[in-house]
Image (tube, grey):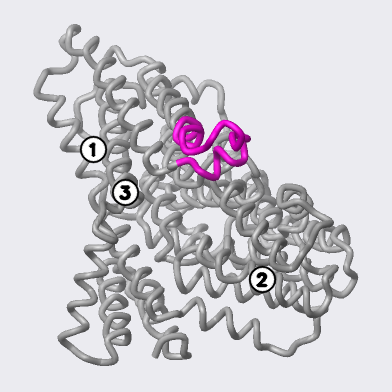
């Protein structure tokens, strides 16, 4: 069963059910059941034992607390509390009122969100959860749908982190590249110089980012996203669900709210998290090892997110005292704020736990290993290897819900294939793995970063998946054409030119098909 074609059935069942039924927990639950059933070789009793074990491993692994998962969950709850208190203090309203005077168009609101995504490149989790929180008041004011906000957030999280050496992603990738180079005795590049050289070769990143800018500037959308944007413009309701937006919620809000009531908690969250990332990495190394890259590589990102979130929550509590003294808030509002914050994040946490559980079982099935071996054993012309690697990395990340897992599986295989066919293609091949994995991660409804992007933007998860999917596919097609050109010409710049031409065609097609949304 393991590492066989049957191993792809459980993740496919979960993904297809999510897309068809739009019921995330039901679909993930069915996928978990089938995955455990296959791992147990069709034994019913062992199936449920494996499900329980996989669920327990979300919290406890090898007899110790699974700190990565636990800290991420706690951070989500802390972020919910920050959001609740900021709203009660009137910070959200004050920031929205201040920004509406400065960001006067829908284009400006979307460009502001993109810039925020670029700025918070240190970690994709932090990016996904923070950018949506900061940008949401102004995008709501300009009637930009939550689906569009989640798409912008997601498209400026992983795509930026994967080309940033000074990020948690960069440190992880550098370690894998270094291992590949040692295995094949490659001395022409260091891991860092290779990483930097590969940045222009990551065609999906440039295609995805280019498309975000085009959609924002052109004010045009297609597919499911167009329906969400038109609904937001016509009704003022930024979601289709029967839920009220922050601007419409009947919750207490202080009349003396200031912009600082929003900005100070977010800024302290940022400073605290970055500070703890460097502190945990610094303490994990000896004095001779403490370079910036090594510090990022050894940093405990999940612990840093938790500590940064805890610091921001404490500061938020302290700031709320001013509103209590002014009789704008009551002491009981503290417990209400904590309760509402946890409640707001509970759905996302449950989805995340289910996603981690199915990922554990899929790993036991060997789905990723099976797909990676297909690439390794295929006898195909080396000119099309970059695009094949790009596609397979996308399939693996889509099926397993993890781009990092696809990196770990395919980077060594891509290095081995290049070394045995055409060593000049090793960097394009490695770049194609990185690009394809981010693409698959963008499309996968069981990806943690996809879940967190919808959470940070307060967007229904399936709405985010269904609206982002067509855009991710368009960006991937353009990137794929770039890899085809690169493979046949062995020239990175020809591949980049192909990507630029593809984006230019999309730009003009959007105008000619009159998909522009009027700026009302």
Is most of the magenta stretch helix, strand or loop?
helix
Q: What stretch of residues is rendered in magenta?
A: 277-299
Q: How crowded is mark 1: few (under 14 residues within 10 Å), some or many (20 or more)?
A: many
Where is 395 relative to 163, above or below?
below
Q: Specify which label sits upstream in the sequence, 3 or 1.
A: 3
Residue at 71% in and 74% down: 416
> What residue is drawn where x is 31% and y is 43%?
76
Residue at image mark 3: 67
Q: Quadrant of residue 353?
A: bottom left
Report the residue marked by disc 1. 341
Secondary structure of residue under mark 3: helix
Q: Earlier in the sequence, mark 3 or mark 2?
A: 3
Label 2: how many Cα within 10 Å (few below 14, some 14–19, many 20+) = many
Q: Residue at x 18, y 33 (%)?
A: 338
Q: Distance between the residues labelled 1 and 2?
A: 40 Å
Q: Nearer the viewer, mark 3 or mark 2?
A: 3
């Amino acid at each position: 069963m393991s590492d066989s074609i049957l191993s792809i059935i459980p993740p496919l069942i979960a993904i297809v059910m999510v897309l068809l039924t739009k019921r995330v927990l039901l679909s993930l639950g069915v996928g978990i059941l089938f995955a455990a059933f296959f791992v147990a070789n069709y034994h019913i009793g062992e199936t449920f034992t494996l499900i329980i074990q996989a669920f327990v491993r979300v919290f406890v692994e090898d007899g110790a607390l699974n700190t990565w998962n636990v800290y991420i969950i706690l951070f989500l709850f802390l972020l919910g509390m920050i959001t609740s208190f900021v709203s009660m203090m009137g910070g959200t309203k004050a920031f929205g009122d201040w920004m509406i005077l400065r960001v006067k168009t829908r284009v400006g609101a979307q460009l502001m969100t993109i810039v925020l995504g670029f700025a918070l490149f240190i970690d994709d989790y932090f990016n996904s959860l923070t950018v949506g929180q900061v940008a949401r008041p102004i995008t709501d004011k300009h009637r930009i749908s939550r689906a569009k906000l989640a798409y912008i957030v997601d498209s400026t999280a992983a795509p930026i982190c994967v080309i940033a050496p000074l990020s948690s992603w960069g440190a992880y990738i550098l370690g894998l590249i270094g291992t590949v180079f040692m295995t094949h005795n490659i001395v022409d590049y260091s891991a860092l110089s290779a990483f930097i050289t590969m940045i222009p070769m990551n065609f999906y990143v440039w295609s995805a980012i280019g498309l975000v800018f085009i959609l924002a500037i052109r004010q045009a959308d297609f597919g499911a996203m167009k329906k969400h944007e038109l609904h937001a413009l016509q009704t003022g309701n930024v979601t289709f669900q029967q839920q009220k937006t922050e601007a419409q919620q009947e919750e207490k809000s202080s009349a003396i709210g200031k912009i600082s009531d929003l900005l100070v908690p977010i800024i302290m969250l940022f400073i605290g998290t970055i500070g703890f990332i460097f502190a945990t990495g610094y303490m994990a190394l000896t004095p001779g090892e403490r370079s910036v890259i090594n510090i990022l590589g050894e940093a405990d990102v999940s612990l840093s997110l938790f500590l940064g979130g805890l610091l921001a929550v404490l500061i938020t509590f302290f700031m709320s005292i001013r509103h209590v003294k002014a009789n704008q808030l009551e002491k009981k509002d503290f417990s209400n704020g904590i309760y509402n914050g946890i409640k707001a994040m509970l759905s996302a946490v449950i989805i995340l736990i289910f996603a981690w559980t199915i990922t554990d079982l899929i790993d036991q099935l060997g789905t990723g290993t099976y797909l990676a071996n297909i690439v390794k054993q295929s006898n195909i012309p080396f000119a099309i290897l970059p695009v094949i690697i790009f596609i397979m990395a996308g399939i693996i990340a889509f099926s397993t819900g993890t781009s990092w897992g696809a990196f770990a599986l395919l980077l060594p295989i891509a290095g081995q294939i290049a070394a045995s066919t055409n060593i000049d293609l090793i960097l394009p091949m490695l770049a194609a793995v990185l690009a394809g994995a981010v693409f698959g991660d963008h499309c996968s409804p069981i990806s943690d970063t996809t879940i967190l992007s919808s959470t940070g933007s307060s967007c229904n998860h399936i709405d985010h998946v269904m609206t982002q999917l067509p855009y991710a596919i368009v960006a991937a097609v353009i990137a794929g054409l770039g890899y085809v050109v690169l493979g046949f010409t062995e020239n990175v710049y020809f591949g980049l030119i192909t990507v630029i031409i593809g984006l230019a065609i999309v730009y003009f097609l959007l105008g000619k098909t009159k998909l522009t949304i009027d700026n009302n």
